[in-house]
Image (spheres, grey):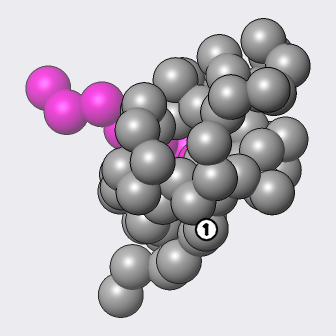
Amino acid sequence: MAKQLHKHCLKFVFIMKKIKITQIKSGIDRSERQKKTLVALGLNKLHATREVEATPQILGMINKVNHLVKVEEVK
């Protein structure tokens, strides 16, 4: 049997978008917390790119390292 979603959950599912994150600056000489955030986002090299869902958790991580990454919306 398929799992049913409540009405308020459906709204969240349909507005989630994909975003492309690219590391544009190095994590060297950054705090350990910022380095771990880059790793959690899947960015381990300069110019590494990942496509991820734009969840509140991911957007929060991007906000913490926004000076090191470039974010684009995927169509």
The residue located at (35%, 87%) in the rendering is 75
Q: Which residues are magenta?
A: 1-9
- The x and y percentages for residue 30 are 81, 27
Look at the picture and state if 21 lies above or below 1.
below
Instruction: Identify the image quadrant of residue 51.
Output: bottom left
Mark 1 residue type: Lys
The residue located at (78%, 56%) in the rendering is 66
Residue 54 magenta-drawn? no
Residue 8 magenta-drawn? yes
The residue most toward the top is 32
Look at the picture and state if 6 lies above or below 31.
below
The residue most toward the left is 1
Look at the picture and state if 55 lies above or below 75.
above
Please tell me how crowded label 1 is: few (under 14), some (14-19), or many (20+) other residues with Cα within 10 Å: some
Q: Which residue is mark 1?
A: 70
Q: Is residue 52 left or right of residue 23?
A: left
In-front residue for pair 59/45 = 45
The residue located at (68%, 28%) in the rendering is 28
